Image: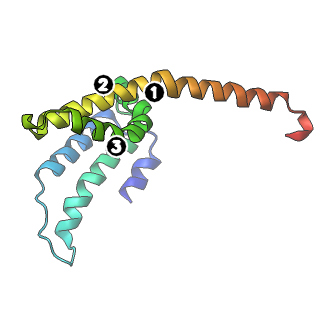
Amino acid sequence: MTLALVKSLRELPILWRFIALAGGVMAYAYVPAPPASPALGFEYVVWAGLPALLFSIAVLGGPLRFRCFGAIDQLGNISYSAYLLHVPLAHAWINIFPLRLGAWPFLISSIALLYGVSLLNFRYFEQPTMLWLNRLLLGRLSRRPASAI
């Protein structure tokens, strides 16, 4: 019901959205996890639902303008490349990386490697392929007779 009310408004004031976002982060960080039991009660609803509700209000209330949106857009662009490449890169990296350095250096370096390779894959393979396919398919559609469409 709250989300329907938020969605029915054109745009929530930016201060409310930032408060909802900050409240979601605080709720996620400080609401204790409920005890493990087969009956999920009110504690579970608060633990799982409150951060989700606050994040939803912040997102559905309108665009949040952050300075880092360029980086977030770039992550969105390379997400499919990262999805395709993360397993092969991890298998290759685990054989190359000196594991005696520990888990955190391995994790950080593998994320950096995945980001770099995915960015190169997006820029030099995925994007040109999409442009080529669009030109090819749109060219075929424009050459069809009007009655065929």
Quadrant for the N terminus in the image:
bottom left
Gap in angstroms between the C-alphas marked 3 and 1: 17 Å
Judge depth for marks 3 and 2 and give the one in front.
3
Residue plotted at (24% across, 52% down): 51
Discs 1, 2 touching: Cβ within 8 Å? no
Q: Nearer the viewer, residue 104 or 35?
A: 104
Q: Would you say residue 61 is visible in this rendering? A: no
Seen at 40% across and 41% down, the residue is: 83
Which disc, if any, is residue 68?
2
Dots 3, 2 in contact, CB < 8 A: no
Residue at the spot x=84%, y=28% of the render? 143
Estimate how packed mark 1 is, as few (under 14), some (14 to 19) or many (20 or more) residues with alpha carbons within 10 Å. Answer: many
Residue at mark 3: 87
Kindly identify which residue carries mark 1.
Answer: 122
Q: Residue furthest bottom?
A: 39
Of the residues under marks 3 and 2, which one precedes in the sequence?
A: 2
The Cα–Cα distance between marks 3 and 2, rounded to whole angstroms, is 27 Å
Amino acid bearing label 1: Phe
Crowding at dot 3, Cα within 10 Å, few <14 / some 14-19 / many 20+, comes out as: few
Q: Position of residue 115 (x, y in %)?
A: 32, 29
